[in-house]
Amino acid sequence: MKFSGSRSLTVVALAAAAVVLAACGKKEVVSNEMVVKIGHVGPVSGAIAHLGKDNENGARMAIEELNAAGLKIGDKTVKFELLTEDDAADPKQGTAAAQKLVDAKVNGVIGHLNSGTTIPASQIYNTAGIPQISPSATNPKYTRQGYAGAFRVVADDVHLGGTLGKYAVETLKGKSIAVIDDRTAYGQGVAEEFKKAVTAAGGAIVGHEFTTDKASDFNAILTTLKAKKPDIVFFGGMDAVAGPMLRQMKSLGIQAKFMGGDGICTTELAKLAGDAMRDEGVVCAEAGGVEGEQKVGMDKFRTDFKAKFNSDVQVYAPYVYDAVKVMATAMVNAGSADPAKYLPALKSITYKGVTGDIAFDEKGDIKNGALTLYTYKGGERSQIAVVR
């Protein structure tokens, strides 16, 4: 169709104006919105997938709540996106997952679950300048590498293993204590700290045997330890190995109390151990814990989590949840999601979470970290005490 004269010019002018207005409108929407990508990595496949999924669900819960709150960073409304990766508790897969998140240009990372994946992955995040908060890695090395962006929201193995070692001697009155560890960064680390504390408290280590995080037959090492008549067996490792180990201890007639760190201190352990789970026969510690008024918030979290995911909290979902909220709060406080700009706000954060008060020391460790001691009764985990 042809137009002539002033009518043609008017139509062209109107069309051009419409294009300009549309473009301006689109630009205005984009300029007032911001997408912030938060990465999460944990083992959602393999023997401890139940723990990885627990952590991932904690992150999902936090992200959904942040988006519902309509937060602003600076003058921009923010939409948080969760990018999840599976590391299968394997260090090589962990570094590959870390690189994928770096390539996706995430603004921050929550994870990994295991020390053995967290530590090598931290090198990749550090090189990329991306802050990382681990909700559960307890090996001291993680925050002792000098990385400015490495943080954790739970106490480390020095505190965890040390507290358990002292408890074994002074409260459980252990006289001959045997140790087994799975040779992972976590298992070996917590076992060594446990041994130091036992010795310092005047206890005797009668044997130290080794397994792997994928083993299922422990008869040889348990038979060796049985001959030394231990009254306590400490295991540095995860619940997927601890459950079968307890079954084999029972079949060999080993009546010793069984101890371990947060890796075994799960709601799943009783199922994995079956009829080998004697009342008060297991004592473990979770790196974290609340008491008094703070317990109300944690109880509500557990209730909400069960309603949302139809599963009980295993161990660290609340710590992942808080870690996501802490990272988002640092961005809001800094007025920026740029890692370099919100990192100082993260270092100086003071946050009241469902897991308690969160603030970091100069290394990136949580200040005044708590531990919760547990046993099992009637197949259920039962709290003994919160200690700091």
Image (spheres, rainbow, N blue to C red):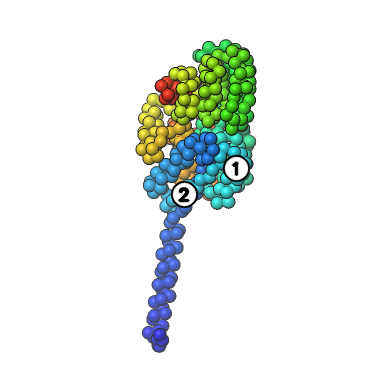
Q: Position of residue 299 (x, y in %)?
A: 38, 31
| Circle 1 SS class | helix
Q: Position of residue 245 (x, y in %)?
A: 55, 24
Badge 2 crowding class, 10 Å Cα cut-off, few under 14, some 14 to 19, many 20 or more, is: some
**Residue at 53% over, 19% down:** 251
Residue at the limit of the structure toward the front, as seen here: 251
**Residue at 43% over, 27% down:** 290
Q: Is residue 297 visible?
A: no
Between residues 285 and 10, which one lies in front from this camera angle? 285
In the image, residue 220 sits, relative to residue 353, either above or below, namely: above
CB under 8 Å between discs 2 and 1: no
Q: Position of residue 124 (x, y in %)?
A: 61, 44
Q: Earlier in the sequence, mark 2 or mark 1?
A: 2
What residue does disc 2 label?
A: 81
Tell me the kind of residue under disc 2. Glu
Between residues 344 and 115, which one lies in front from this camera angle? 115
Does residue 92 appear left or right of residue 48 in this picture? right
Q: Quadrant of residue 33?
A: bottom left
Quadrant for the N terminus, please. bottom left
**Residue at 46% over, 53% down:** 34
In the image, residue 170 sits, relative to residue 374, either above or below, namely: above
Tell me the kind of residue under disc 1. Gln
What residue does disc 1 label?
A: 93
What is the spatial separation of the Cα atoms under label 2 and label 1, in whole angstroms?
Answer: 22 Å
| Circle 2 SS class | strand
**Residue at 62% over, 13% down:** 228
Q: Position of residue 67 (x, y in %)?
A: 40, 47
Give the numbered dot on residue 253: none
Does residue 8 appear left or right of residue 167 in this picture? left
Q: Is residue 3 visible?
A: yes
Count of numbered circles on the image: 2
